[in-house]
Structures are given as C-alpha cells and as structure tokens.
Image: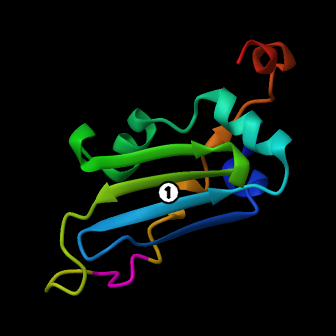
Amino acid sequence: MERLIDLAAVLRSKNSGPFSITLDILFDTSEKFWRVRNSGVISRETIENLYNLNSEDITELVFYEKGLGIKITFNRSISSGTVGDRDVYGAQQHAPLFNIFVPKEDLNEREKN
C-alpha cells in the first residue's frame, strides 16, 4: 500500500466560492489515476468521515479520466471570511487526504471497468 500523497502529482484545496471548498487530486500517469479510482478509497463516505460532513454537504465528486484528476466539492461550515473562519482561501483543507492508503491495483479489476 502507498499513501495518496505519494501517488498524486498535485493534492490541493481551494475556495469554490465563499460557501464551498474544492479538493483536487491530480495524477501524472493514467496508471496512478486508475489505481486510485478503482481502489474505491475516494468515495463520498471517505470524504464524509475525513471532514466530518453529512452526505448532502458533498456537492460534487467527479473522476475526470481525460484530466487524470478527481474533484471533490463540499459546503463550508462557515463562509469564507466570516468570523471564526480559520482558512479564508480554503488552501489548507487538503491535509486529511494525505494519509489515505491505496492498495496495489488488481489488474483484473481494471479490465472489468
């Protein structure tokens, strides 16, 4: 198993407007993209648990094969810049993704998809 941070070329977060945050996971090879996608470790349930969210808070979870990326958008609990907001740009919210462990890919699984 390897950690997601070791497989991703880019792992970042940013505001997606004042009321939501987007997480981007980008890969430099299709093999890494498919390994993570097929493993199932990136799911709504995973994001709910990592960020203490309800399912309706996640507005987008997209696997974009052509861009070798995964985009996850969720509602902020406090709007950007409001009193109590600790990350006005949403740029420090990707850290919980670092230690997601990704199992080795079963090549037979890829052929099924």
Q: Is residue 23 above or below residue 52?
A: below
Which residues make up the magenta segment?
86-90
Q: x, y (%) of residue 113?
A: 70, 18
* Residue at the extreme front: 66
Left or right: residue 94 compared with residue 28 = left
Task: Work out which quarter of the rendered image holds the N terminus and state it.
Answer: top right
Q: x, y (%) of residue 56?
A: 22, 42
Q: In front: 10, or 84?
A: 10
Q: Which residue is mark 1?
A: 96
Asked whether residue 88 is drawn in magenta, I would say: yes
Q: x, y (%) of residue 66?
A: 72, 48
Residue at image location 74% in from the left, 43% down from the top: 33
Q: In front: 67, or 31?
A: 67
Left or right: residue 15 compared with residue 36 = left
Secondary structure character of the magenta stretch overall: loop
Q: Is residue 81 above or below residue 32?
A: below
Mark 1 is on which residue type? Pro
